[in-house]
Structures are given as structure tokens and as C-alpha cells.
Image (cartoon, coloured by chain):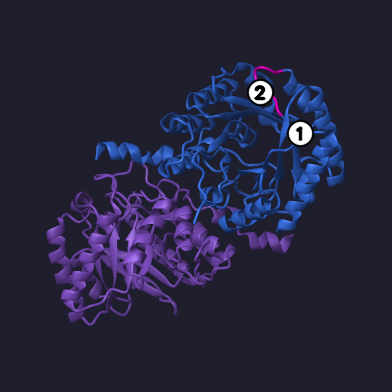
Chain colours: A blue, B purple
Amino acid sequence: MADYPTRVRINEEGPREGFQFEKGPIATADKIALIDALSQARLPQIQVASFVNPARVPGMADADAVVAGITRAPGTTYTALWLNEKGFDRALAHRGQIDLKGSISMVASESFMLRNQNRDFAENRRVQTRMVARYVEAGLTVERASMMAAFGCNFEGEVPVARVLAVMAETFEIAAECGVTIKTYSLADTMAWATPAAVQRVVGAVRERWPDLKVALHLHDTRGMGIANAFAGLQMGVDTFDASVAGLGGCPFAGHKAAAGNVCSEDLAFLCEEMGIETGIDLEALSEAARLAEQVVGHALPGSVMKAGRLNAYRRAA
Amino acid sequence: MADYPTRVRINEEGPREGFQFEKGPIATADKIALIDALSQARLPQIQVASFVNPARVPGMADADAVVAGITRAPGTTYTALWLNEKGFDRALAHRGQIDLKGSISMVASESFMLRNQNRDFAENRRVQTRMVARYVEAGLTVERASMMAAFGCNFEGEVPVARVLAVMAETFEIAAECGVTIKTYSLADTMAWATPAAVQRVVGAVRERWPDLKVALHLHDTRGMGIANAFAGLQMGVDTFDASVAGLGGCPFAGHKAAAGNVCSEDLAFLCEEMGIETGIDLEALSEAARLAEQVVGHALPGSVMKAGRLNAYRRAA
């Protein structure tokens, strides 16, 4: 019935997702403390900041100080996000402290791209081609691509599966022109349009067309479907997920009145633990980091397992 | 890959679950207003109160007044919960205003039963036999049974599938002795131990043993797995779910430090809507009732769709 993976990689995006989304100012030292707590939980990858225009995303104005301040843990990869050459130049200055990799960034909805990146499809193709050339020049690998709004858009409505496949095909054209090969494609449900059946439909169509491509999922929980969507992905054999500690975050340009954040890292890790799927994560330490995240942002966050506890603790007591 | 039903019945338990669980006092008029709002959402069934000891569950002290005060809507069944003969006698006094049906109540964990109902397995068998005799005497149908803690217990740990099957077999013995036939068996994840894989394992084992029995699920969201568990149930063809508007509720005797409530009615109805599964529910009206529930209890509740909105609204605007 299902093609569950034996091991799942949960890439932590809470610091980047959360600090860009939260309204109140968060002290740089608190951001660093949270990232260091996440490192202690043995996450395989943590996205620590985005190098974006501080006028548009004030919460990221201290990105350079955050990146400089974290303590790297062995076994964890530290990544950052940027949307243009200016952002990439800022990231390059931290080479060594963050692990730089190139990727191709696509969007399934042009309306959303105009709001989020302020460019249209044609302009994005030029930007991506130029960016990949810069990554290659800087000696970075470029093996990953991502697509925002892959399951639907608050501004355009449904995204047909055919569009997802067309945008992916364009991505591979850009890669081929630049002499790089995409091995992992991350599909992002930026505006929380995915349902479990849609995840299976889209991932199934991608698999059929490109059987050797690794598919990753970046899921939001805005409509409460996050874990169910992840489970649907697991059933399809998806083994790489972005997630946010405590369910931090959300996209400031998604046009939600009340946005819950990404699928919650510790809840997803709990699902894997209970299904006998390895993640390598210390779930107790991750739950502690989730409780720290609530302190840092100053309000309750949606994660459940940090409040209710794992089952293993009850099993030992019983 | 899946055996999705074409139509799903969502039985609303928010009033009973929520009013028993919330700490602050809730005015009787507010309880009635919420139930009336739920009636407007065209839910097929609403559990409006439990006739239990007010010394143990103070939030239910006004159960008689609540039941007397609601306005019945055509097409909706109104139910109540009771745990013993005294409670049943109170419910009987409201015959006509609530729709009385008999059922057999079992528990998979004796430790939990001692905490929740203050009786052991042997005593429960005597109580259930006596209760069914009383239902039959009162002219009620007895076609439903339920089992609490069917997926695990905070006090006993794992509940093996064999125990679930044994408790079910005992239920059918009680029914046979009393001359009634159980057609629907509701499995309750009272302490939120279920995961999607466990739902499929348990429901699968029950199906194999009793292929003609209708299986219903009563799911809690305490560890964030509620919607994923419901999706796993849908994949197994389960077409009857208990749920709580806005995610109200939780069991006061489940021993959780911080309990989220039941799986959220409007989020589950949204999942069904997006999968093309009919529920008969007016999802906009249900989301309004969810927002009213937040006002009534005086704090934020976990439901997502009431905050983020359905996709159909965005589809129309796009």
C-alpha cells in the first residue's frame, strides 16, 4: 500500500521562516540561542537566515550578525536563503560559517512571483541563468531546484499538474544551458493549498515523468493539513522535508489573514519515530528547542509534541 | 491505492468535549448559542451534553438546562453522553429534545477505565449488560459500541491489536446475551496514541475479522496527528468520524499536561471537501461556529481553516 522510506531527512527552516514572519523584534542573541539549541538536537540541516532586503523583511536585518554568531555542530549543514545577486554576495562573505550551495528557484504562479520576488517568469529565467553562472564561478555545486506555490496560489487559484511539470521542464533547460544537473527538486506548498490527495497526485506525476529525480516537500500548515500532507508524501516514498521547529513561520507575502507556519519539525519527527523511520534527530532536545522558540517569539506556537510529550516517555513509565 | 468513501459523516462532539474540558465557567446561554450555530452548519449529529457527576465534571452541571434550551434543526440528530444508570435516567427525561440511542461502552485499558469510570473490566461488563437491558426496556435501538484508549494509554502504554480485537469480541458477547446486534464500532484514540500507520493497522485487523462491521473513528489531536490519522482512516474506507468544532476539548482524565482537543471538525470537513468527499456540511457556517467557540471559551482554539479560510473563496477570487 505504501512505499515508506527507511530514513527521512528533516531540513530545519524555523529560524529563517520564523524570523522573517514574526512581527515583534527578536534579539540577535535569542536567534543565535535558538539556532544553537537546534544544533544540539542533531538536525541534519538548519537554514539560519535569509539575505534579503531589510526594508521588505525587517526581521532579517541582522542576518549577518546571526550567521557570524552561531556555533556550528559537526554533522549539521548550515544554509541561508537569498533571492538575488546582492543577497548571494552577502552570503558569500560568510563562506565556511555557512555551507553554500547553489539552487534554481522557480515559482508556479507568476502573480505570486511578482509579489514575492518582484519579477515575471521571463525575468526569473534570466535571473536564474545568471545566478547559476555565478554559483559555478564560485565553485558551488548546483544540484537542487525548488518551486514555490506548486500546489496552488491565493492569487491565481489552482495550479494544474501540467504547469508544475512545465516549470520543472524549464528548470532542467536552465540547468542544461548552464552545464549543471538537478538531482533534488523541492516542491513548496507556499500558500497551503496542498491536501494529501494532491500531494500524491503531484508527486506521482513528477515520479512518472522523472523517475530518478529526488522529490522533496516544503509544506505549510496554514489549513491544518501539514502532517497529513507529509504522511501522504511518506507513502509516496518522499524522504526529504523542510519543517520548522514549533511550527514557526509563514511567508509574509502569501496574503493570509492568519498564517500558521510550516509543518512542525518535532511533530513530523515524532510521526517518523512512531513509524519506525529514522531521522537521526534527538526528539527530546528538539522539543526543548521548540519550547525555547515560544519564549524567543513571546507567544504560543502551534507545535503539539513539545506540549504533549512523546509516547516513549509514557511507554517507559507504564 | 486507497478505498476513499464517497460520503463521510462527521459527528460533532465539540459542545460535550469542550464544555467538559474548559477550565473557566461558560454561561449556559453561550453553550446554547454555540450548539444552535452548529445546527445552522447542517452537521448530521451533535453531541450536546454529558449527564455525568457535576462534582467530577463541573462544566456539565448545567447539562439539563443546555439540552432544554437548544433549538433542534431538521436533519440533525442530537445526542448526549452518560456513563451509568443515573446519567441515563437524566437523559431519558429529555427524550424528544435529544435523540436517545443505546450503545455499549468499552475501554481497552483497565487503568484508564479505573480513572475515567471508576470501575474495572469485570464490573464494566456487568454495568454494560445492565445498561443494554435498560435501553431495550426503554425501546431504544442498541446498534453502536465504542472503545476508549483503543490505540494506546498514558497509564498502560501500548495497546496491542490483539487486545482491541478481544475487547471487541467481548462487546459482541454482551450484545448477543442481551439480544442486540452491533452494526457500528467506534474506536477512540482517547489519549492521542494513534499515528496514521497505527490507524491502518488496527482498522485493517478489525476489517479482516469482521468485514461487515462499520468502523468509526474518534480521534484526538493532542500530538498533532489528528488530520493525518483521519486521512489514514479515509484511505481505509472509514466514513464516520467524531470531531470537535475548532478542535475543542479533550478528556479531563487523560493525564495530559497540555491537551489539545479532538480532531477539528471544520479542518476535517475541509479535507473532505478538497478530496471531493461529500459531508453535507455548510463549511462557511461551521467556520463561523468555530470562531464563535473561541469567543465562548475566551481563548484561541487550534482549528486552522476558520482562520485561514477555505480554498473555494480564493478560487472564486482568482
Marking on residue B300: none
Q: Amino acid at mark 1?
A: Leu
Gap between marks 2 and 1, in whole Å?
17 Å
Inspect the image, locate mark 2, and give the three-letter code of the amino acid beneath it.
Asp
> What residue do we see at 47% from left, 61% from top?
B265
How far from the left and from the top, in percent, is residue A297? 54, 32
Along the line of sight, which residue is nearer the eye, A101 or B40? A101
In the image, residue B6 lies in the stretch drawn in magenta: no
Q: Chain of mark 2?
A: A
Closer mark to the observer between disc 2 and disc 1: 2
Chain at tag 1: A
Inspect the magenta stretch and tell me whether residue A95 lies in it: yes
Write down the residue under mark 1. Answer: A83
Q: Position of residue A228 (x, y in %)?
A: 51, 52
Q: Quadrant of residue A115?
A: top right
Q: Is residue A42 above or below residue B144?
A: above
Of the numbered discs 2 and 1, the one sitting upstream in the chain is 1
Q: Quadrant of the C terminus of chain A?
A: top left
Does any portion of residue A178 appear in the rendered image?
A: yes
The residue lying toward the viewer, choosing from B97 and B45, is B45
Residue carrying label 2: A99
- Predominant SS along the magenta part: loop
Q: Is residue A210 positioned above or below A36 on the image?
A: below
Q: Residue furthest front?
A: A212
Q: Tell me which segment is drawn in magenta.
A: A94-101
Q: Are marks 2 and 1 in contact (CB under 8 Å)?
A: no
Percent across and percent down for residue A141 are 73, 28
